[in-house]
Image (cartoon, rainbow, N blue to C red):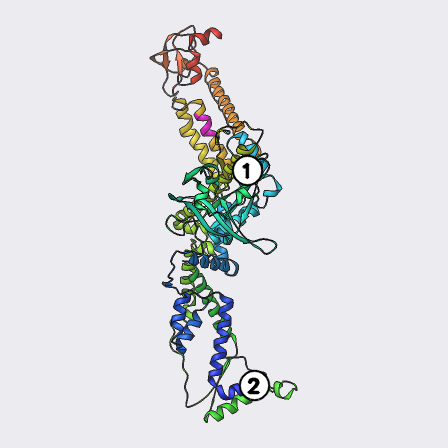
Amino acid sequence: MSVMDRVRRRFLGNEFDKLAEAMSMLNRSYYDGPWRMPPAQLAQELKELDSQLLYDLLQQAGWDVVSAAGYGDVGGQAERDRSIRESERLWKYSPVAQQIITTWTSFGVGESIEIKAIDPNAQEVWHEFSTDDRNKWLLSQPGYRSFSNWLLVTGNRFLAVYGSEADGESYVRRIKTSEIQEIVTHPDDDGIVLFYKRVWQDSSGGSRTWYYPDWWAFFYGGLDDEYKDGKTLAEFVLKTNDKRADKIKSNDETGTVVCIINAQYGEWDDGSHWGRPLLAPAGAPWLRAHKQFLESRLAVAKSKMLYARDVTTKGGSRAVDAVRRTLQSSLASSGYLETNPPPTPGSELVHSQAVTIKDLPMRTGAGDADLDHDQFSWIAGLSGGLFPYFLGLDSTRLATAKAMDKTQLMRFSEYRRLLSDSFKTLVRVVLLMRERFDVGTIKVELGTLFESYDAEVSVDSLVEADVESLTTSATQLVKDIVMPAYDAGLFSDESTTKVIAFLLRTILTGFGVGTVSEIVDDEELGLSVGEMLAVGLTTRQEQVTTSGSLSESHVGEPINVTCPICGHSGALHYPGHGPLLVCASDDCGQTFHPGLEFWRGYGSDETRESE
């Protein structure tokens, strides 16, 4: 200890210890996070300079109060920025928060994603874009997971799509959520986004501010059309010196344009275009409280594992000090070998008989640790939209959690549709870029070049598919419903083919996303099923006709139906043989199916003459 330290302790005494403790707590709060109390309210409270109040405020520094926070700017930009920073810290340092985000992402993007434009011509453009190395940072499995993670952490994910004015070829880049400072909406309708204000530092350290158009406003919003007072819509909502990102590198021939796609998770406010982080602000206090609880329990457990004694001496404070000096280490003062190992902090308690220290009853002691942990973990997980099983906090198997499966899987399905819509929008923008700027394309009205601008986004199933059960169910469905309906004429050939093709595709998809497309495309699948169906029907009819005439084993009921083969106005129906009929003419006697489209066409005079 230096001379100055001894002087300070001489004159300040206990106040010096309190000051050192306060500085230690301030240092801890600095690393734990920013102040959670609004600055104005904090300044007002600190004016009293009450020591107990100061102690409480220092304890709360870096932690949220699990109650009404009392922010004056509720729902404003400052609170949203604070929530995003808080969510980012939780994502980096909280194991529970990491589990919440990664679980949502796993159910959202699965093991693989397949994006395919519906129109074959559009698929060629999309395939060129999706296989370009410049876009692999997004259109790959690590890219999909990163997109989902940061969408959940920050509430928004901004994709900037750049298009060449020479040929319409495009590529995509991401813009950090923290760089988007403002969303500019239409003056007459705040539901229409026109621009995103981006503020960032370039590689040279200089600050830049650009306004990026929203993709819908860029293609359909009429930004450069006259709006009011002789100004275009863009000129009306932006200031004179504001820079439009889509105009900076554009020369109307060989330049580059850009627009933004905003993927938004939830709503920060009613009608807001800002998303809401999954972890904050509602869940952050509970996630922090859970982390703090576990740290506190760890400290208690560690202290209980130490060797502890309670030493009592007869005498006053001088006797107590003498015992303490005796128990202390001699290494620091003598410099020789240690003769008495130093006691672990907190493991020795020395007091006189005049002082009695007792522990007060604690209902949340070691015996209540599991119960307290379950309560904190349940609320912490619920704030992130997960039940304890998905947090790894429940030892039961998934099969025992069926009561909660429906609600949980519905939320995951909603999130999956959100991701699907974002990627469908990306496909649409890529196609519109090609249509608008490809000089080799005949100029047509925007949105009319391709038959469809939509896409199919396929993700593997939320739960592990039971292929055996799927196969059994599909087989039973075809046997008991589809084919009897087809025999009765309720299903046409085309409808039956589509139903069976859908069932076949569902079964194959159970083996993994992409299985069907790797084997055969949709058109070939439909034709294959149709051929299988035709072969099956032919085989069934051949079996009926070659096994002998129906009239040889049954008594037929005459009905008034024209034979499509010979034109005889009369047929026989035999019970137990469905809709199959037999021509009543002795010269014909053929079996036919009155519900098939083939037979209906075959019964016409023109068809018979051509045969």
| Residue type, numbered disc 2 | Met
> Which picture quadrant has residue 384?
bottom left
**Left or right of 490, for residue 132:** right
Looking at this view, is 529 or 232 the one in front? Answer: 232
Q: In this rendering, is residue 491 above or below 582?
A: below
> Which picture quadrant has residue 570?
top left
Task: Answer whether residue 338 is visible to the viewer in this image.
Answer: yes
Residue 192 locus on image (x, y percent):
41, 43
Q: In this rendering, is residue 583 above or below 485?
A: above
Residue 312 locus on image (x, y percent):
47, 88
Looking at this view, is 459 or 11 the one in front? Answer: 11
Tag of residue 4: 2
Residue 11 locus on image (x, y percent):
49, 88
Looking at this view, is 324 or 266 the one in front? Answer: 266
Earlier in the chain: of badge 2 and badge 1, it is: 2
Q: Are marks 2 and 1 in contact (CB under 8 Å)?
A: no
| Residue type, numbered disc 1 | Gly
Q: Is 496 within the magenta?
A: yes
Q: Which residues are magenta?
A: 495-500
Secondary element at image label 1? loop
What residue is rendered at 55% in x and 89% in y? 326
What residue is rendered at 56% in x and 31% in y? 520
What residue is rendered at 61% in x and 40% in y? 132
Q: Is 450 within the magenta?
A: no
- Of the 4 image quadrants, the one containing the N terminus is bottom right
Q: In this rendering, is residue 428 above or below 378?
A: above
How many other residues sit within 10 Å of disc 2, few (<14), some (14-19) or many (≥20)? few
Residue under circle 1? Answer: 514
Secondary element at image label 2? helix
Select label 2 or label 1 by which is in front. Answer: 2
Question: Magenta region, mostly helix, strand or loop?
Answer: helix
**Left or right of 70, for residue 180:** right
